[in-house]
Image (tube, rainbow, N blue to C red):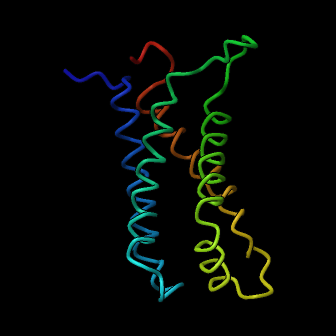
Amino acid sequence: MFETNSLATRIAIGKAMGLIIGLAAFMFIPYFLPEASVTLKWGVLLWYITFGAIIGVFGVYTKVPMINCTIPWWIRGAYIGAWLNFIISLIAYDALAQLLLSVFGENGLLVSPFWVVLEGAVFGFVIDYLATRIGGEGAGIV
């Protein structure tokens, strides 16, 4: 009745995983940064839902046409996740700097807001793994 290998399944898996990550962040931000605004908490929640959806959509692309090579899911997911979090680190640099400073302290190793790029690569890897495993990949899923 339902075909599991579909773009809609990939997007649903990506959004569900993004919702889980976003809800975790939504609940834990007040513990680490009590003065965090409501817009920051909601922004992080909605960001990760969108993050998962974008990774789900990009599962259609398995080849780079210009150089005619295939992209494995683990590179695609990690790259997209890292790129998206790099962009958000540029947009919300000050808020991320405050958050990471309150979590790791003034002399902490992970104080730079650009550490969220690595976080994005890890989350992108996990989301693309699950989306590929359950929803498939390639142009055939459309």
Say above or below: 27 vs 15: below
Q: Is residue 133 left or right of residue 108?
A: left
Residue occupying image coordinates x 38% and y 36%: 11
Comparing 47 with 76, the one in front is 47
Q: On the rendered structure, is 133 left or right of 78?
A: left
Residue 97's spot in the image, x, y percent? 66, 75
Q: Quadrant of the N terminus?
A: top left
Residue drawn at 69 percent across, 68 percent down: 113
| Residue at point 59%, 57% (across, down) | 88
- Work out whether 72 lies above or below 36: above
Relative height, residue 51 to residue 3 (above, below)? below
Q: Position of residue 93 (x, y in %)?
A: 64, 67
Q: Position of residue 23 (x, y in %)?
A: 39, 65
**Count of residue discs:** 0
Q: Position of residue 127 (x, y in %)?
A: 51, 44
Q: In the rendered image of this protein, does residue 5 appear above or below residue 119?
A: above
Q: Nearer the viewer, residue 15 or 132?
A: 15
Q: Quadrant of the C terminus?
A: top left
